[in-house]
Amino acid sequence: MDKQVVETDNKSGKSHTTGIILGLSAAIISSTYSPFSEIVTKNGLSHYLFSGFAFLGGVLFCGIALLVQLILTRKDKEKRLLLKTKRDWLFTLLSSVFGVFANLCLMTALSIAPASQVTLYSNFEIIFTTFLAYFVFKEVVSWYSWAAIPFIACGAILLSLDFSSGNGVGFSWASVISLGSALGWALENNCSKQVSSKNTFEVVLIKSSVSALVELAIGFGIGYKTITSYVAPLSSFGIGILCVGLYYFLYIQAQKRIGAVRTSCMYSVSPFLGSIISMVINMKWPVWNFYVAFCFIAIGQLLVVIGMLKNDSRNRKDKERLTKK
């Protein structure tokens, strides 16, 4: 038994480091999604159709990856880790439904407000994710993560205020809908965590397929004009391969290693990057609250990383102690 504990502890350090890298990579990729949608939809394509075609790109990415994996593991089917139990399918379905809800809220918000504003509200996702993980899914949340939440919350609230005119923005419809998106992603994150040990490509393929069908149906069904140019749909499709397929793969792999809460903390850098990209596109720069909020959220992320490093150090000491015995 002691030997098994030592082996597990020995792997945890590398696993946490890999999880941090995967989580930050997912955040960087995700940050381009809203700015890309802003560019593509300027050419006449609705936000819902953009999202639908983007998720089709995710379907292609994960479909090909899953097929290759199935071929490579044809002699050892246990390595496929495919969905089997009712519980696996339930959480995959719930994750798909919450993901659709979150993305529909995001696309709706983007249709009435600029991406530089909308993306910042997704910082609230970490708060929703943590409370759901702890109270509903009974995930262990370290005090470092709890300590990070006030900093991230203060940063997110500060970002929601517009000081450029000297007055607070308050809660516009765009902000309310964006908060709905953050709650949807938090629910999706926790449900995804429940199947993170399963085949990532299969899970993401199912989620992307559901989202693509729903959003294309909405996009084509609410009176938008016929698509006359294939540039926008093809661009959306290509963006989806990167921002949906690859993003989801990296995110779930990160969850597998460091949990839903920590991965969500790593993801909190994404809204900043997305907002910066959007502001570069529109040539509009932030005022002081953006930089102060960035410092708050950076402190929150640093606390999470310190917590994981402390845990790794403790595991190494336990390993050395057990080895001496």
Image (cartoon, rainbow, N blue to C red):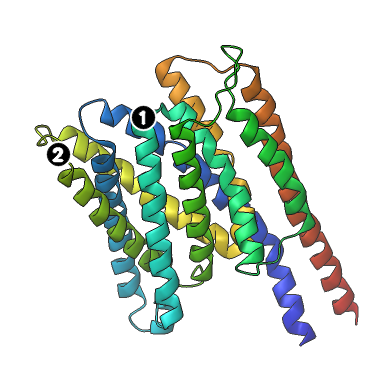
The residue at 22%/26% (across/down) is: 43
The residue at 48%/70% (across/down) is: 195
- Label 2 is placed on what type of residue? Gly
Q: Nearer the viewer, residue 271 or 63?
A: 271
Q: Nearer the viewer, residue 275 or 3?
A: 275
Locate residue 155 relative to residue 25 in the image: left or right. right
Instruction: Give x and y (percent) for residue 311.
Output: 78, 61
Image quarter (top left, top right, bottom left or bottom right) of the N terminus:
bottom right
Q: Secondary structure at mark 2?
A: loop
The residue at 62%/24% (across/down) is: 290
Name the quadrant containing residue 256: bottom right
Instruction: Give x and y (percent) for residue 134.
Output: 66, 63
- Label 1 is placed on what type of residue? Ile
Instruction: Give x and y (percent) for residue 259.
Output: 61, 61
Q: Is residue 312 visible to us here?
A: yes
Residue 74: image tag: none
Q: Residues within 10 Å of mark 2 (few under 14, many from 20)?
A: few
Q: Secondary structure at mark 1?
A: helix
The residue at 82%/72% (across/down) is: 319
Residue labelled with disc 1:
112
